[in-house]
Image (cartoon, grey):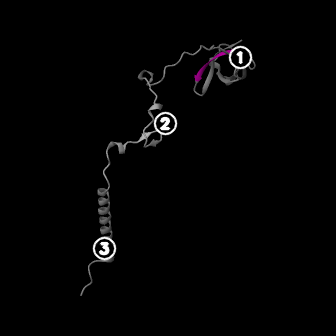
């Protein structure tokens, strides 16, 4: 007589399938036994003033009223700024005539600004007092329209 056609691994797979089926049936019965949700109230969650979810609704006494006209969409309008004197004064800290550039130190802020020979209206040397204006350059602010004082 021959042996059974069922091997050990087939028996194990069948046991796993049966166990899964029983677990699924148990979960289904458990769901049926639980009471149904009473509706929307059980599903709602609230957010407190710190952004954390809670189950309790917010206190109406702490409510802030915002008018629709107060809401700004996009970039806020710029407030009028006081006109600052565009001409600044400083001293030439360094200037290389061969390479055509140097640096000017502003008197008020002690800030150094790059200056190129193309921005000069007259020739300057180190330690000269100058007046200049600023423009945004590739690597920061540059001194332009530089004049000796």
CA gap between label 3 and label 2 equals: 59 Å
Query: Which residue is under mark 1?
Result: 124
The residue at 32%/68% (across/down) is: 19
Number of dots carrying numbers: 3
Q: Which residue sits furthest top?
A: 149
The residue at which mark 2 appears reads as: 49
Residues under numbered marks 2 and 1 in contact, where contact means CB atoms less than 8 Å apart: no
Question: Camera-side residue: 77 or 35?
Answer: 35
Q: Which mark is in front, 3 or 2?
A: 2
Say if 86 sits above or below 59 in the image.
above
Task: Find residue 104 and report its image quarter.
Answer: top right
Seen at 30% across and 51% down, the residue is: 36
Which residues, given as a range, are shown in magenta? 129-136
**Magenta span dominant secondary structure:** strand
Q: Is residue 55 left or right of residue 131?
A: left
Q: Residue at x 45, y 43 (%)?
A: 54
What kind of element bears circle 1?
loop
Residue 67 position within the rendered picture, expressed as x and y whole percent measured from the top left: 43, 23
Q: Residue furthest left?
A: 1
Q: Earlier in the sequence, mark 2 or mark 1?
A: 2
Residue designated by label 3: 10
Q: Position of residue 35 (x, y in %)?
A: 31, 53
Dot in front, 2 or 1: 2
Q: Is residue 89 magenta?
A: no
């Amino acid at each position: 007589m021959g042996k059974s056609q069922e091997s050990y691994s087939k028996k194990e797979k069948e046991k796993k399938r049966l166990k899964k089926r029983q677990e699924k049936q148990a979960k289904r019965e458990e769901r049926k036994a639980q009471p149904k949700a009473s509706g929307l109230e059980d599903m709602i969650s609230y957010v407190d003033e710190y952004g954390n979810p809670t189950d309790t609704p917010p206190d109406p006494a702490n409510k802030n009223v915002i008018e629709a006209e107060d809401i700004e969409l996009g970039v806020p309008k710029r407030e009028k700024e006081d006109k600052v004197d565009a001409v600044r004064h400083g001293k030439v800290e360094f200037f290389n005539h061969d390479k055509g550039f140097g640096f000017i130190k502003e008197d008020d802020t002690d800030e150094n600004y790059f200056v190129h020979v193309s921005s000069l209206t007259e020739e300057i040397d180190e330690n000269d007092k100058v007046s200049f204006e600023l423009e945004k350059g590739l690597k920061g602010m540059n001194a332009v329209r530089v004049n000796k004082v």
